[in-house]
Image (cartoon, rainbow, N blue to C red):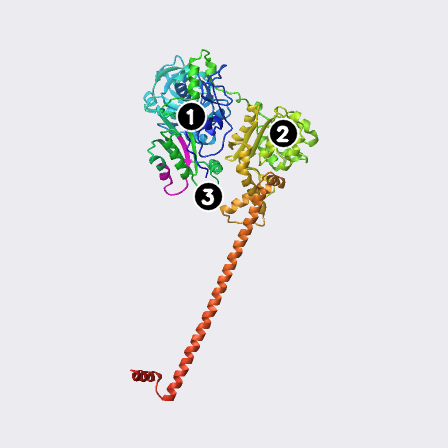
Amino acid sequence: MRPIVFISLASLLWKVTNAALPGGALNLGTGIVSSTSTVSSSDGSLTAKGTDPISGGGPRKPVRIAYQGEPGAYSECSLRELLGPHVTSVGRPNFEACYRAVASRECDYAFVPVENSLGGSIHENYDLMLRYDLSVVAEHEFRVHHCLLVKPGVKKSAIKYAVSHPQALAQCDNYLRSLGITPVPMYDTAGSAKILSEGVGLPDKCTPENTAAIASDLAGKTYRLNCLEKGIEDDDVNFTRFLLLSRTGIVQHLNPKIPSKTSIVFTLPDSAGALYKALACFALRDIDFSKIESRPTAASLLNYLKFRSQQAHGRKARQRSGSPRFRYCFYLDFLASEVDEISQNALHHLNEQSDYLRILGSYPQKSRLVGPIAAAVEELKNSNNQLSSEEVSLSTLPSDEDDEKKKLNIGIIGYGVFGEFLSKQLVKKHKVSCIDPFDKSKEAEEIGVDYYPMFDMMSFLSDLDVVIIAVPMIEFEDVVSKLPVDKLRGKLVVEVCPLNSHPKSVMLQNFGPDVDILCSNPMFGPSLSDNNESPSPVSWDGLPMIYEKVRIADMRRCDKFLSIFERERCQMVEMTAEQHDASTSDAEFVTHLTGRLLDRQLLPPTPVMSKEYAALCDVADMTAADSFDLFYGMFKYNSRAKDLLKKMRENIAKVERQLAAKEAYLAASAEMKNNDRKQLIEECKILLREVASSSNIAAKVEEKDGKPAESKITETSQKES
């Protein structure tokens, strides 16, 4: 297991400035370094590379905050209460869109609710925090005040119906009953106010003259509705806790004078007392909690967590990972900064107890802001160039185009098994073409892909946005060297080899700076079904997609391509080609070697199949679907492949020796037992002969003297006495 180093504030600051772990914090659970780095601004604060500095020359870009909902939603009210009126709020259709907007750099922060004092936790956002490498930088507790909104001129006595989100209606149930108003549920609080204002899309029997909306006062101002009454909720302790998420953390801006909080998530082995031992890591050091909650975790997410844990901890994680039907993630908030010495000791201790541990972020308590966001809010407050109302609140982003405009023109060089496997998914949303030395027109036509013969390479490349090179690794250098480089200018070239270092160096040598380069390894692929020899469809949900943005000028196009895998719920892991090969090359080679050693004769079908046998069958099917050239590439470009083959032979010979030794031992034991039995029988025979001989002698003496042998003995004894 990789050790955790006790980090001083100075060393941690150096780490963040130079290597920036995902989320900008000490990420104990991954060991994977993100390429998102940070640079120092003129005032010494840190900002993510690619964004404008907090201070310095030139106008600063607006600070964009993504939230879920329509303009005027309670989330927007809360972020304005925390960050002020000058930041730009961007409404998103769902929570995942908020995370994606920050990950793709279209927004600077995401502002999401995680728990409500009446409704409980919002579990979707906890799950998304694991899927996206964002870090918590602030928290805010927002008091929810429901308002009764109507069109101008409508009186309270005329209201018969109230439209809003079901939860808001439930929280105002007594108030609505007292007025005889019928609640009518809709998808959103601010959305219901918007529909009421426009007068279009209201439920049956609802009209702008007899209907009110229950929403925030900001929604009333946004959609020009009158607020007849504020604070109509039945319970006056309705609070919602929000978290502000960023691509980089702010732990380097915390100091002992700032009351801090740290959020973590961890999983535990399925053993007695595991949770007690985990909590003891903090209790023994007098670290207080503000929240702890367990949540069942999806199998696909657990597979990803197991993959990330194995990247960090290796064999130990594989040995202690079980597969119970229900696995739980524990979310815990403790009242200390992660860089405090006692926190480091506790986290170190917990890391030894847990299967997976990740720090979601350290941040100030009670709505306090520090670091770049605090400086940005202060700068916007003092700026003379105030944004217009249209710029302060947005509901769309540049990526929110219609599907036709979002389509990429993707070309696949090498339409083998893996190229065909990728195209089946890519063609659903994008235009896909392929080129191959063999005639693949029939296979391509069946799934809606355009086929080009090799002699028509110039036409194939002419209109492409993305070029995927899906050829065996042993042919990669030859194929790349023959490509017309002038036709690749301004395009994104993607390689999908199982090892990335060699393709990366080949592309950097052959392509100039005007060609974007993306190294990737989708760690999944086709497998052969039992009934036929065609690749069977496999879900990408929860499977790892490793990538490195080697050289990217058009970041938006690159992110759009990667979003294909994100939308399929792949687990996106950004790491360098060298890190990838060091982590996975040996494991991939051994896996494919094992699969090739197994065949149908060694793995016959059986009506009763154990989990271990099923796993071996899966490995054999996966490797059977891949070409031998792919496997040879893993061998040729892995410097340790020959050592692994030698070790495999040694292990097989060792097992053979162990089997032979065991067989010889058992045979010798059986023979020894047989010899012992024969010897015992001979000894019994000798003893019986001696007994028989003694009986014959006694009988002869008795006949000669006329006395029994016993009396003779008695007389002899008396004489001797």
Instruction: Count residues near mark 3 (Cα–Cα under 10 Å), then give few for <14, some for 14-19, many for 20+.
Output: few
Residue pictured at 47% horizontal, 29% vertical: 22
Instruction: Determine whether label 1 and label 3 are within 8 Å by CB.
Output: no
Q: In the rendered view, tell whether residue 381 sits above or below residue 272.
A: above
User: Upstream in the sequence, badge 1 or badge 3?
Assistant: 1
Residue 518 picture quarter: top right
Mark 3 secondary-structure assignment: helix
Mark 2 secondary-structure assignment: helix
User: Upstream in the sequence, badge 3 or badge 2?
Assistant: 3
Instruction: Count residues near mark 1 (Cα–Cα under 10 Å), then give few for <14, some for 14-19, many for 20+.
Output: many
Q: Name the residue under label 1.
A: 252
Q: Name the residue under label 3.
A: 319
Is 275 within the magenta?
A: yes
Give the magenta part as a residue range. 263-279
Q: In the rendered view, tell whether residue 293 sits above or below residue 161.
A: below
Instruction: Determine whether label 3 and label 2 are within 8 Å by CB.
Output: no
Q: Mark 2 points at which residue?
A: 509
Give how far apart the Cα atoms at labels 1 and 3 are.
Answer: 35 Å
Q: Looking at the figure, which quarter contains the N terminus?
A: top left
Give how far apart the Cα atoms at labels 2 and 1 are.
Answer: 39 Å
Residue 328 x, y percent position in the rendering: 41, 37
Q: Looking at the figure, which quarter contains the C terminus?
A: bottom left
Residue 618 x, y percent position in the rendering: 54, 43
Identity, as a three-letter code, of the amino acid under mark 2: Gln
